[in-house]
């Protein structure tokens, strides 16, 4: 796949592009719209650095790796959020067991044990 890149933001992020099956189609489009054509570098476009002057695209692999590490470090939060009983059920447990009763504490602790902080 080829891309015709016709715009970038002031901080050199991808702003305008169109995908093409052939290099010649991408180049024709790029010429018409004052851009440039490249073979699709793939990956997450949020980490592409576009230079309209030099007509290049590079991938900011350090920023991409940092984002992936951040996502991995907080995965337990997303796992817990989807595993906790619904709020209505939690409140019902508290009500029936009394403030902070055993049923509520056991349900919350089971989620915390299944999805430990730090991914262990």
Image (cartoon, helix red, strand yellow):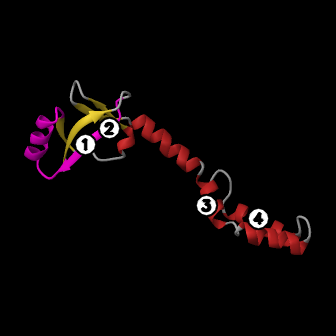
Between the residue at mark 2 and the residue at mark 3, the CA separation in whole angstroms equals 32 Å
Of labels 2 and 4, earlier in sequence is 2
Q: Return the residue at label 4.
A: 108
Residue 103 point in image, percent of width and height: 83, 72
Q: Secondary structure at mark 2?
A: strand
Residue 80 point in image, percent of width and height: 65, 60
Of labels 2 and 3, earlier in sequence is 2
- Whether label 2 touches label 3, CB < 8 Å: no
Q: Return the residue at label 1.
A: 17
Residue under the point 34% across and 30% down:
12
Residue under the point 9% across and 41% down:
28
* Disc 4 packing (10 Å; few <14; some 14–19; many ≥20): some
Which residue in the rendered view is the most extreme toward the bottom?
96
Residue 98 point in image, percent of width and height: 92, 70
- Whether label 4 touches label 3, CB < 8 Å: no
Residue 10 position (above or below residue 37): above
Residue under the point 16% across and 36% down:
33
Q: Is residue 6 magenta?
A: no
Q: Return the residue at label 2.
A: 14
Name the quadrant containing residue 107.
Answer: bottom right
Q: Secondary structure at mark 4?
A: helix
């Amino acid at each position: 796949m080829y891309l015709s890149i016709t715009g970038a933001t002031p901080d050199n992020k991808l702003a305008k592009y169109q995908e093409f099956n052939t290099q010649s189609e991408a180049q024709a489009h790029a010429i018409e719209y004052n851009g440039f054509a490249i073979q699709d570098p793939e990956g997450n476009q949020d980490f592409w650095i576009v230079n309209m002057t030099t007509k290049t695209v590079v991938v900011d692999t350090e920023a991409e790796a940092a984002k992936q590490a951040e996502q991995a470090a907080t995965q337990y939060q997303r796992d817990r959020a989807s595993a906790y009983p619904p709020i209505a059920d939690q409140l019902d447990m508290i009500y029936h067991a009394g403030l902070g009763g055993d049923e509520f504490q056991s349900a919350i602790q089971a989620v915390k044990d299944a999805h430990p902080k730090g991914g262990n």
